[in-house]
Amino acid sequence: MSILDILEPVYRILPEVKTPEVQPPIKKKIFWTALALLLFYIMGNINAIGVIGSNAGPLEQLQVILASSIGSIISVGIGPIVLASIILQLLVGGGLLKIDLTDQKDKARFTAMQKLFAIILCFVEAGVYVLSGLVLAASGMTWIVILQIALGSIALLYLDEVVSKHGIGSGIGIFIAAGVAGSVIWQIFNPTYFDPTYVDPTTGNAVGRIIFDLANAQGYIFLFLREAGSNIGLAFVSFLSPILFSIIVFLVVVFAEGMHVNIPIAIGRGGFKSRFPVKFLYVSNIPVILAVALFSNVQLFVSVTQGRLSAVPFVGNFLNNFMVFTSQIVIAPNRLVQNILTEGVSPLVLQQFAESLLKLQVIGLGGQILHGILYVIILTAVCILFGKLWVEMAGQGPEAVSAQLEKSGMFIPGFRRDPRIIKQILDRYIPPITILGSAFIGLLAGFADLTGALGSGTGILLTVGIVYRLYEELAKAQLLETHPLLGKLLG
């Protein structure tokens, strides 16, 4: 008896969003998607009762991508949902969890197991956030705060299910895009965002706040003009380069989304010729989402174990230093490019680079450069790993796709109709494109993070990919609604 069989009684009592018997019209899908998005924004602005403060610390850069808002009821965001997916993918990929994802019954039970595991992790991560000090709870309110944060993340889990079954796209993707978009708008239109000396003196007076912000806007513009007058290069780097790099990332992702390889296929008895496109970004942005979730959990682990590893005999200090160094490396130095442009690379910087490597500490600009190089390498490697795992788990591998094409009456022209033949052809394209696409998306995300792009480079990359695919799904849903016979043919 497998673990799926043992846990089946638990699956049955879990609340579930039912799949609609008939595909809802596109207007209804948009309504459910918009409602989920509205609830996400509302929850992100509701502070948990009993919270007296918060300190995002190393998770400051990641909370936008994790659709979280530290101190609110969605402090842990989608972290537990994605972590559950990561762990189960690794278990299945390593053969430790025996399951046949091509079998509908096993696939349904696996999905239920993933939901159960995610709910458990909601409570675990909520506890870590509060007990580690990322979220500060008032005396006697610790467990109440943990419960609120856990329930907030569970609510996101079910909102994701609502969007997946009744809306358009993925709830997780939409929450990420919404968080990043909000961050970008705030950074662009808040004139004091880049001013570290800014202190808001208002205490809730709306009129006073508007007047104060207008005054700061004038000061901000004057500061830029003053810098431009004395050093146009420094002014550009400090104020305009984040916007420029955001635009560059946007254009590169849109260009990459349109790249694909066409495999010739024939349909039906008449052999009507068509093409099966395999996109360069075959893995979409899933590997980056999984990588960011993994990095955030590394941060949580280090925050809990920091200092305690020193008690381990002989290697305790090394382990402690190594874990601290690892926690630093998996968070991008997001203004590295600006720092290099303004400070330059000198012999002192090269010395700092060597010292950082030997001491496992980020020292000066040289340490930031080493940090950036290692961050990009690690992110790219993790993206390739998750890309390969996701393709198999999602039924997008050569064997699964060949079976789908054969079932739909498609075959490769010039070859006999056999799914094994289709698989051999797909083996030439899908595995290499999976690796190349995963590596590209990892490299692009890593480099974008180093530029200080608005909303973080990874955030911009994810948002563009999510919106692009949302547009594709909207266009497909509209086409199928306009031509119902086409939907029956494809179904």
Image (cartoon, rainbow, N blue to C red):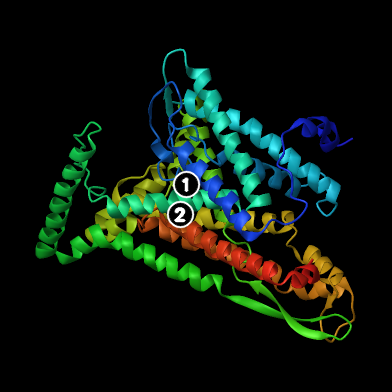
Q: Position of residue 211 (x, y in %)?
A: 16, 44
Compared to 314, does 434 lie above or below? below
For the residue pair 487 and 121, the one nearer the viewer reads as 487
Which quadrant holds the N terminus? top right
Of the residues shown, which amino acid type is indicated by label 2? Answer: Gly
Mark 2 packing: few (<14 Cα in 10 Å), some, or many (20+)?
many
According to the image, label 2 marks what residue? 459
Asked whether the viewer can see residue 70, the reply is yes
Compared to 173, does 247 lie above or below? below
According to the image, label 1 marks what residue? 330
For the residue pair 388 and 274, the one nearer the viewer reads as 274
Which residue is at a point 78% across and 34% down the rendered structure image? 11
Compared to 30, does 479 lie above or below? below
Q: Position of residue 147 (x, y in %)?
A: 55, 24
**Label placed on residue 365:** none
Q: Nearer the viewer, mark 2 or mark 1?
A: 2
Which quadrant holds the C terminus? bottom right
Answer with the quarter of the image where residue 263 lies: bottom right
Q: Position of residue 448 (x, y in %)?
A: 42, 60
Asked whether the viewer can see residue 310, the reply is no
